[in-house]
Image (cartoon, helix red, strand yellow):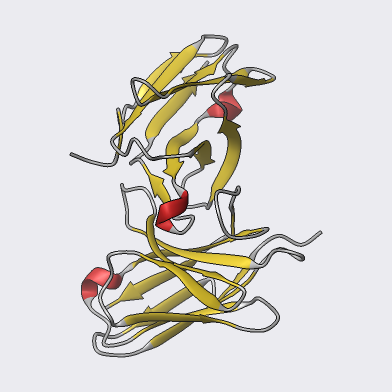
Amino acid sequence: DAGVTQSPTHLIKTRGQHVTLRCSPISGHKSVSWYQQVLGQGPQFIFQYYEKEERGRGNFPDRFSARQFPNYSSELNVNALLLGDSALYLCASSLVGGDYEQYFGPGTRLTVT
Amino acid sequence: RKEVEQDPGPFNVPEGATVAFNCTYSNSASQSFFWYRQDCRKEPKLLMSVYSSGNEDGRFTAQLNRASQYISLLIRDSKLSDSATYLCVVSFTGGGNKLTFGTGTQLKVEL
């Protein structure tokens, strides 16, 4: 069975640009969460979606937004990119919302120059 | 105070050694606990969930002490392939299934 997939794997953008990252959860999983991981730190929670509704939001500015589609895939959008947005963006899927185990995709490595 | 605290290491141990990692968390409402393993420039992979009664999976044993808000991971008979960063992870339902990660403890197993 396919695991969590993310695209693209790598991305280079310029300050002020916009980026869209995509994620497909494990088949049968209905919840998707997004995390940002900068070098030397653990992943930081950005959003969780379950059944197409936002169920949780981390301490990130409004430049960050996300949505979940009827097929449970998800997009993370970041506007007005800053140098500090350079990080590994991880998507995790779980069967349902709540305290269930989450499985991570390989991530999208974003570099902002 | 960080929500989840871990000793960053690195822990350098010889092959075959037993090594223990500790983690403390600040939110007493936390309900679920996990250990994830992360290899360099890869995604975190779920190693094991941690239950109040403690649990074991082969060479790995996890313990939870809710009263002290403390989680541990014990690795016996270390292998070279165990070299990685081990992330302590906590969640509580009120946080919308948000996982809160520690910064990770780096393990290097040497010949």
Closer to the camera in the image, B41 or B105? B105
Q: In which quarter of the image is residue A72?
A: bottom right
Q: Is residue A89 left or right of residue A71?
A: left
Closer to the camera in the image, A84 or A69? A69
Residue A113: % across, % down: 26, 78
State the residue at coordinates (53%, 77%). Answer: A53
- Quadrant the N terminus of chain A occupies: bottom right
As drawn, the residue found furthest toward the left would be: B1
Q: In this view, does A54 lie to the left or right of B76?
A: left
Q: In which quarter of the image is residue B15?
A: top right
Residue B7: % across, % down: 30, 27
Q: In which quarter of the image is residue B65?
A: top left
Closer to the camera in the image, B28 or B71? B28
Q: In this view, does A85 lie above or below A90?
A: below
Q: Is residue A97 above or below residue A23?
A: above
As drawn, the residue found furthest toward the bottom would be: A17
State the residue at coordinates (60%, 65%). Answer: A31
Q: In this view, does A47 lie above or below B64?
A: below
Residue A91: % across, % down: 53, 64
Closer to the camera in the image, A111 or B53? B53
State the residue at coordinates (41%, 21%). Answer: B21
State the residue at coordinates (26%, 87%). Answer: A80
Q: In this view, does A95 lie to the left or right of B8?
A: right
Residue B34: % across, % down: 52, 37
